[in-house]
Each structure stands twice: as structure tokens, then as C-alpha cells.
Image: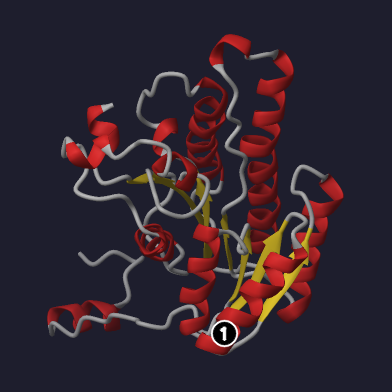
Amino acid sequence: MTSRFTDPVELQRVENLQFQFSSRSLEGKVILVPGGAGGLGACLVAQLLSEGAVCVAGYRSNRTRAEFVKSSLESRFGGTVHLVEGDLCDEMARRRYLDETATLKGSIDGMACFVGDPARVPPEGLSTGDLARSYESNFIAPVLLAKAVGEHMIARKVHGSLVLLSSMQGVGVFENSLNYAAPKAAIAHACRILAKQWSGRSVQINVVAPGATIAGMAASSVNSGNDRYVEERTVSRFGRPEDVTRAVRFLLEPDCYITGQCLLVDGGMSLKA
């Protein structure tokens, strides 16, 4: 007996080995990228432009850097990078990100959020204020924005995906990383909660957890004496922005069949942590 939830045409297509692979499924889609002017975020913006997506890159305050990213990527990949400014820790800024993005075509089709703070504090001096600030930047701000964007998409029956950024430190156990790792671990759990909450709806949400990359917040760690990880063959090389972008883009697929998951992109470093 055939399920009433299957499409006979689709069943026949599969039977005939007529598999479909979309290469530009985000063409014309409006994708919000908070942190899109940063090292990792800018790489995703480049990928989205190359596919013909409508890209909105958010930045906190460095307008000069944002304009440089905009002009550089537009000249190389075509299209337009729409910029929006604001610190996501500010509720009004989160509202502005959502409203200005939705204004472009009436709705938002997806989001990948690259915002965060390295929150580097010596463990022996860790204070209540340090932890509070880290949770605000690395957990509260991105989660509340994801919740707002997801609800916006669900209300409009938009099929799309959201991706949040955690870190290998939020998955593996690394010494002296409490201030940064704890909120990043909380991101993954919040993702699972939202995925379950939105189960059966039109929106999927997942997390990508980068490792030691040569761009983004991890770049300073790579350049501060971590060559031993490659020398000792913990990893074959340090990560590149493109490694993270490929994972994020995979999960941004509008008809993504994955939700509530955390994908590590760390070359295996967390396996030996």
C-alpha cells in the first residue's frame, strides 16, 4: 500500500533513476548573514553571491571593513551585498536586521549567523561579569535572532534553513575555555530545542562548529603557537574559510532534510582534545 504522503510522480522518478541535484537552489533567495563582513562570514557571502542569492551582510560597527567586503565581493562575483549595521546584543538592532532584510522581497529565506566574541579571559580571573558578557554575545544574541527569523519564516510558510555557529570548544573539552566554550555548547542545545519546537514546520535549524581556522576568531590562536597540532598530526592542516562555508551552505539548502544537528568542521582536532 502506497503512503498518502508520497507523490506518485516522485516515486516514478526515483524508480527510473532520474535523480535530481540542484546547483543553484538559493538563486534569488534572501539570505541574512550577521557577521558577514568577518573572515568566515565574508566567505559565505561570496558563495551566496556566486549562486545569485540576495545577500544581507550584517556588521557590528566597522563600516570601513563592511564597505571593503561589499565592494570587493561585488566586483568579483556580481550581485549586491546589502549591509545592515548593529550589535546583536541590542534588541533594537536585532529587529533592524530582520526588518531591513525582509523589506527586500517581503520575507527572509534563510540565515547563517557568524556573530560572537572570543571572550578570552584568564581562567583564574574569571568573573560573573565576564561570563554574563560572553553569554550575551555568544548565546543570547544569536539565539534570539534565530528565533525571531524562524518565526518570521514559519508565519509566512517560507521553506528554508537557519544555521548558527558554535565552536569545536563547545563540543570537545578544552582546558581554560570555560568562558567561551560554555555558551557555544549552549548554542547546540538551543538549536535542538528550536528544531523540536518547529518540528513539521517549514524551517530547519542546525549548527556548524568550526575548529582552528586561518580566518575568523580562531585565526589569532592559529598564529599564537599552535603549530604543534599539525606537527603532531592531530590535524593534517589548519582549516580554511571555504571548509566552514561548504558546511554552512550544505545546511542552508531550502529543502534541507536535516535539523537539530551540530556539524563539526575541525579536521578531527576535538577527537584528541
Q: Is residue 203 visible?
A: no
Judged left or right of residue 92, residue 243 is left
Judged left or right of residue 97, residue 39 is left
How many numbered tags mark residues here? 1
Q: Tell me: residue 230, above or below residue 123.
A: below
Give the SS element for disc 1: loop
Q: Position of residue 89 (x, y in %)?
A: 76, 42
Q: Position of residue 14 (x, y in %)?
A: 18, 78
Q: Position of residue 134 (x, y in %)?
A: 65, 30
Which residue is painted at 62% across and 72% down in the image? Answer: 69
Q: Position of residue 195 (x, y in %)?
A: 50, 45
Quarter that holds the N terminus: bottom left
Q: Tell me: residue 14, above or below residue 221.
A: below
- Which residue is denoted by mark 1 in the rendering? 28
Judged left or right of residue 40, residue 80 is right
Q: How is the image coloured?
A: secondary structure
Tell me the quarter of the picture where residue 140 sits: top right
Which residue is painted at 48% across and 30% down in the image? Answer: 185
- In the rendered structure, which amino acid carries the disc numbered 1? Gly
Q: Residue furthest right?
A: 92
Q: Is residue 35 visible?
A: yes
Q: Tell me: residue 40, above or below residue 194.
A: below
Tell me the quarter of the picture where residue 108 sits: bottom right
Which residue is painted at 35% across and 82% down in the image? Answer: 23
Q: Residue furthest top?
A: 124
Which residue is painted at 53% across and 49% down in the image? Answer: 164
- Crowding at label 1, few (<14), some or many (≥20) Cα neighbours within 10 Å? some
